[in-house]
Image (cartoon, rainbow, N blue to C red):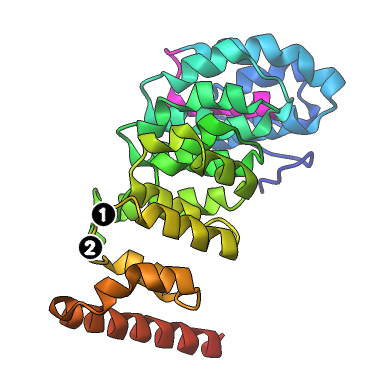
Amino acid sequence: MDVFGGSAINLKSRGLSLIFFEVKTTELVAYLKSPSIWAKRAAWHQISDRPNAETRQLAKDLISLASDSSQDEETRIMALWSLEGIKHYDHSLIKALLASRPDNLRREAVRSLQSFSLSADELASLLTKLSSDSNPMIRSEVLRTLEAVKIANTETIGLLVAACKEPLEGNAMGGSYERNFERFLARKALENYPKELSVFIRSPKAVQYDISNLIWASQALPKEEREQVFVDLWKKTNKKDLDEVTFVLVAGMLDNRNVLNIVLPILENENKAVANVSLTLKKSVHSAIKGIDKGVE
């Protein structure tokens, strides 16, 4: 039976039987290199759970192991997790891991930033390049991390706004699914930073981003403010119709006279009547389905 967290962990691999809570602290790092995933995890748990006064001496060996490109990816990740466990941050190591080739290692290096008390400036410096990584799981982890750290500045807000791109039709993996999921994660993260987002949208830096990005991002603001921001932003566009996402956003703001007035020419356009009715019906169906789901719950 394998039991973590300080209890006995009996490993039977290649004839070896160990009780991990009896292993000396100085010997634990070596077990992160074990061919057994159970031994790796047992050693990581012991490193993380033991008093920091004992385990902080392991930092140098853990950094060396995590840095060693000859080791397998799992071993290096376990070493990184162990450094998180003893709350030891090494800037040079993290920079190297974020630039490494293995995707899972890069992702875990991004996630690990949540474990260390870094400034928003440091986070922006480390994550800017990775926010446009070719691998969607890396991009998604950047967004999750920016949400989790509970700290932001102009640069990190900019990374989140940049991820608020227009949706793609469909839900196919390798394209529209990832785009739409990242939009969701970015807006979710921005809900943690309404003050910083408000300042950003009104700053000169905002002109570097598409209006569509800013409109989607602004939905993370309080109701009155997001409605005014929508009006201000819509005045800067040349759009003559409403896509499905914007139509849904607008439909929830029509009790605001300023919003109604600015989109009324589009809603009254007879040439757009069929499209608008179609969007209205689709919104009604979605609302009905949500109501049914809530009733079932």
Residue 81 in picture, x, y percent from top left: 61, 30
- 142 left or right, relative to 212: right
Residue beneath label 1, please? 176
Element carrying mark 1: helix
Which residue is located at x 64 percent, y 11 percent?
Answer: 61
Q: Residue at x 54, y 56 (%)?
A: 220
Residue 236's place in the image compared with 28, above or below, is below
* Numbered range of the magenta stretch: 69-84
Q: Secondary structure at mark 2?
A: loop
**How many angstroms separate mark 1 from mark 2 (CA)?**
6 Å
Does the magenta-highlighted stretch encompass residue 80?
Answer: yes
Residue located 59% across and 23% down the image? 121
Residue 208 is situated, as x and y percent measured from the top left of the image, at 37, 34
Q: Nearer the viewer, residue 88 or 47?
A: 88
- The amino acid type, in three-letter code, at marker 1 is Ser
Q: Which mark is residue 170?
A: 2
Image quadrant assignment for residue 250 = bottom left
The reply to whether the C-beta atoms of the residues labelled 1 and 2 are less than 8 Å apart is yes
Q: Residue at x 32, y 74 (%)?
A: 264
In the picture shown, does residue 93 fall above or below 284? above
Q: Is residue 25 left or right of residue 72?
A: right
